[in-house]
Image (cartoon, rainbow, N blue to C red):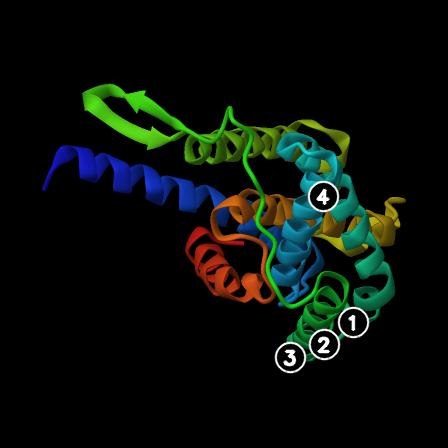
């Protein structure tokens, strides 16, 4: 096999792995902390992609589109948790699967009503719409390297958040023993809302990053959802 092709495919796999990491990190946070099987996580990925695409077209800047879409996706996740998901925490996993599957259908139709049935493409800025010359004469798309860089930075940020901050301490406490954490004065409901919002923002970021490659389209979250569950099973909750 040609070494150039091998390295290019290795980088492609690493780039896909970073997208799966961003998506699965949010999913495993929600399941590990809240014990909630959320099939609608892929729909949040889709909403993030459409939001970023719209803001990019309005602001004429992909970077600004992502910067403004991230807090909107965080807010969307927190509102979704407060309205629809908070009532099913005490139910068994089968009820959660059925409820969140219903959310998939609802959110798909909501996106269809707001944005229409056609997808939205995101134009890349000139800085990212090109290639970089790597060692061994390999030419690789700049944007795919950008995705890898964002994934690495998010991984470092998540480690810092969970291991070094007070919020991370509360997250670990809630995951270990939510009853004891609540007895010690931790607002579990607020913690769950914050964790779900963080997970939604990570899923939305993954959708925003893939949209310039595959474009934002209805149902795009269902495909990556299956792969994300595989990642979670292999990597551990």
Q: Position of residue 48 (x, y in %)?
A: 67, 50
Does the residue at mark 1 contact the one at mark 4 (Cβ under 8 Å)? no
Q: Position of residue 147 (x, y in %)?
A: 48, 35
Does the residue at mark 4 contact the one at mark 2 (Cβ under 8 Å)? no
Q: Which residue is mark 3?
A: 94
The one nearer the camera, 231 or 224, is 224
Residue at position x 53%, y 62% in the image: 225
Q: Find the distance from the CA under tag 3 to the CA under tag 4.
A: 25 Å
Mark before the other along the chain sequence, 4 or 2:
2
Position of residue 28 in the picture relative to residue 194 (left or right):
left
Residue at position x 47%, y 47% in the image: 213
Q: Which residue is mark 2?
A: 99
Q: Find the distance from the CA under tag 2 to the CA under tag 1.
A: 8 Å
Mark before the other along the chain sequence, 3 or 4:
3
Mark before the other along the chain sequence, 3 or 2:
3
Position of residue 187 in the picture relative to residue 218 (left or right):
right
Q: Find the distance from the CA under tag 3 to the CA under tag 1.
A: 11 Å
Query: Split into 4 quadrants, where in the image is the N terminus?
Result: top left
Does the residue at mark 3 contact the one at mark 1 (Cβ under 8 Å)? no
Q: Position of residue 91 (x, y in %)?
A: 75, 75
Q: Which residue is mark 4?
A: 171
Q: Which residue is mark 1?
A: 88
Does the residue at mark 2 contact the one at mark 1 (Cβ under 8 Å)? yes
Position of residue 210 in the picture relative to residue 139 (left or right):
right
Residue at position x 41%, y 56% in the image: 234
Mark before the other along the chain sequence, 1 or 4:
1
The one nearer the camera, 98 or 167, is 98
């Amino acid at each position: 096999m040609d070494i150039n092709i091998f390295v290019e495919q290795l980088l492609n796999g690493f780039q896909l792995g970073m997208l799966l990491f961003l998506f699965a990190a949010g999913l495993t946070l929600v399941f590990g902390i809240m014990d909630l099987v959320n099939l609608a996580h892929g729909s949040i990925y889709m909403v993030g992609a459409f939001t970023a695409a719209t803001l990019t077209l309005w602001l004429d800047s992909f970077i600004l589109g992502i910067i403004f879409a991230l807090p909107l996706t965080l807010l969307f996740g927190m509102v979704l948790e407060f309205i629809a998901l908070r009532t099913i925490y005490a139910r068994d996993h089968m009820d959660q699967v059925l409820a969140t599957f219903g959310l998939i259908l609802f959110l798909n139709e909501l996106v269809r009503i707001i944005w229409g049935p056609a997808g939205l493409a995101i134009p890349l800025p000139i800085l990212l719409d090109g290639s970089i010359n790597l060692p061994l004469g390999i030419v690789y798309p700049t944007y795919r390297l950008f995705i890898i860089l964002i994934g690495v930075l998010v991984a470092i940020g998540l480690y810092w958040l969970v291991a070094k901050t007070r919020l991370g301490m509360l997250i670990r406490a809630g995951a270990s023993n939510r009853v004891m954490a609540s007895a010690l004065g931790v607002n579990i409901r607020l913690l769950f809302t914050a964790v779900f919002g963080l997970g939604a923002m990570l899923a939305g970021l993954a959708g925003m990053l893939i949209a310039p490659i595959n474009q934002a389209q209805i149902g795009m979250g269902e495909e990556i959802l299956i792969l994300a569950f595989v990642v979670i099973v292999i990597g551990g909750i």
